[in-house]
Image (cartoon, helix red, strand yellow):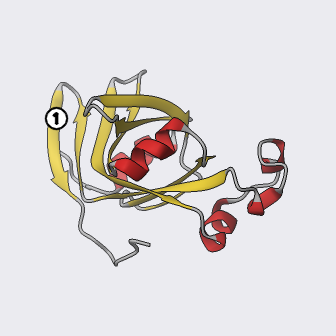
Amino acid sequence: MLKNVEATPGKLIDKQSVSLIGSVDGDGFPNMKAMLSPRKREGIQYFWFTTNASSLRVAQFRENSKASMYFFDKRFFRGVQLPSYMKALEDTESKEMVWQTGDTLYYKQGVADPDYCVLKFTAHSGRYYANFHSESFTIRLSHDRDT
């Protein structure tokens, strides 16, 4: 049984250096992509990633915001899946919030680089797997941050 819906998956997520992100292509097929771990997260409800505004994934999320994230611990064969929606954000406040020293390696113009954007994922439910058992859960919304 999943005793703490937020803490148990949250600890698993924090230990992973790779996130699997799912989007839907124009033909309705799922597409998966490995990305670095989220730049920022609030609980297991809100996640922010950085990526190129010109990327295929951003184009897919702009067309269809349905998304999924999966984090897994291969050593102990545990994982958490979060299906929901992803938004591509290009406002200065969002970009500054997750900007890190060294990002100019990828975005030469800094935070104002037109090819730099933020992906924001808002989870409402999930499914946790561990010890040959899986369990669905609902995430209690703490506050509305759907910007």
- Position of the N terminus, as image quadrant, is top left
Residue at image point 55% right, 42% down:
37
**Residue type highlighted by circle 1:** Ser
Q: Residue furthest bottom?
A: 143
Q: Nearer the viewer, residue 124 or 90?
A: 90
Q: Is residue 73 left or right of residue 112?
A: left
Q: Is residue 136 left or right of residue 69?
A: left
How many numbered marks have been drawn onto this rendered protein structure?
Answer: 1
* Residue 4 against residue 133 in the figure, above or below: below
Q: Nearer the viewer, residue 62 or 14?
A: 62
* Secondary structure category for the residue under label 1: strand
Instruction: Give the class, few, some or many, for how many residues have Cα within 10 Å of label 1's Cα (few <14, many ≥20).
Output: some
* Residue 14 against residue 98 in the figure, above or below: above
Residue 60 in view of the camera: yes
Expressed as whole percent of the image width and height from the top left, the position of residue 78 reads 32, 30
Residue at image point 34% right, 34% down:
25
Q: Is residue 106 left or right of residue 84?
A: right
Residue at image point 32% right, 75% down:
142
Q: Nearer the viewer, residue 141 or 12?
A: 141
* Residue 143 against residue 112 in the figure, above or below: below
Expressed as whole percent of the image width and height from the top left, the position of residue 127 reads 21, 42
Please give the residue where the numbered disc 1 appears in the rendered image. Answer: 134
Q: Is residue 83 left or right of residue 39?
A: left
Residue 16 in view of the camera: no
Q: Tell me the quarter of the picture where residue 101 sits.
A: bottom right
* Residue 75 against residue 72 in the figure, above or below: above
Expressed as whole percent of the image width and height from the top left, the position of residue 139 reads 24, 61
Expressed as whole percent of the image width and height from the top left, the position of residue 95 reads 65, 64
- Position of the C terminus, as image quadrant, is bottom left
